Image: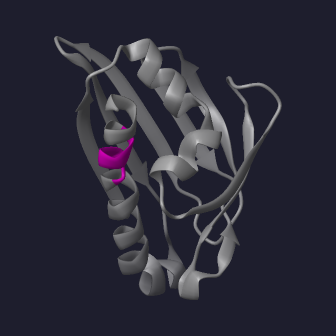
């Protein structure tokens, strides 16, 4: 099962950091793979996002998702509901002396032919996604 985890410390309060990540419409600022994104309804538990990400050859592919956990300032999770791979994502926010520690984890359960053909590219993509936390850190600390 492809899985990736990355942690950063951001010199901002947990409330500020959580609010930034909770609004998925901020994702294009720090996730280079996001081509377009829009939210249906208010930010919060059960929010749904229509998202298109860069796929093979730069072609936009659907990767819509739904927020599955929403605990202000501490936990945010989602499940991808459209597209060829449907990972789950989990953000954890913890106060630290100089701000907030953010841990972002992605995992995807692949089986059969998808496991055989897509495990390596999916792993590569997940590694890049979680590493993008460094970009979010730079944006939030400006």
Quadrant holding the C terminus: top left
In the depicted structure, whether residue 140 falls above or below residue 3 = above
In the depicted structure, whether residue 1 falls above or below residue 18 = below
Residue extending farthest to the right is 41
Would you say 55 lies left or right of 16 here? right
Quadrant holding the N terminus: bottom left
Instruction: Identify the residue at image location x=57%, y=77%.
Output: 55
- Coloration mode: one colour
Observer-nearest of 47 and 24: 24
Observer-nearest of 142 and 79: 142
Would you say 59 lies left or right of 88 here? right
Instruction: Identify the residue at image location x=42%, y=34%.
Output: 91
Type of secondary structure dominating the magenta stretch: helix
Instruction: Identify the residue at image location x=31%, y=35%.
Output: 103
What stretch of residues is rendered in magenta? Answer: 132-136
In the depicted structure, whether residue 140 falls above or below residue 2 = above
Residue 74 in picture, x, y percent from top left: 42, 17
Observer-nearest of 20 and 130: 20
Residue extending farthest to the left is 97
Would you say 70 lies left or right of 136 here? right
**Does the magenta segment cover residue 108?**
no
In the depicted structure, whether residue 50 falls above or below residue 102 = below
Instruction: Identify the residue at image location x=61%, y=40%.
Output: 24
Q: How many labels does the image show?
A: 0
Residue 79 in picture, x, y percent from top left: 60, 46
Residue 75 in picture, x, y percent from top left: 45, 23
Observer-nearest of 133 and 118: 133
Residue extending farthest to the front is 142
**Which of the 4 image quadrants contains residue 56?**
bottom right
């Amino acid at each position: 099962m492809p899985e990736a985890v990355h942690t950063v410390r951001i010199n901002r309060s947990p409330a500020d950091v959580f609010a930034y990540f909770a609004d998925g419409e901020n994702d294009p600022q720090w996730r280079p793979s996001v081509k377009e994104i829009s939210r249906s309804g208010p930010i919060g538990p059960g929010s749904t996002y229509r998202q298109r990400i860069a796929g093979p050859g730069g072609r936009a592919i659907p990767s819509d998702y739904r927020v599955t956990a929403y605990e202000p300032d501490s936990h945010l999770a989602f499940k991808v509901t459209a597209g060829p791979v449907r990972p789950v994502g989990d953000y954890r926010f913890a106060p630290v002396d100089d701000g907030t520690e953010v841990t972002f984890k992605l995992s995807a359960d692949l089986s059969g032919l998808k496991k055989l053909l897509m495990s390596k590219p999916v792993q590569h993509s997940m590694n890049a996604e979680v590493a993008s936390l460094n970009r979010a850190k730079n944006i939030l600390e400006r």
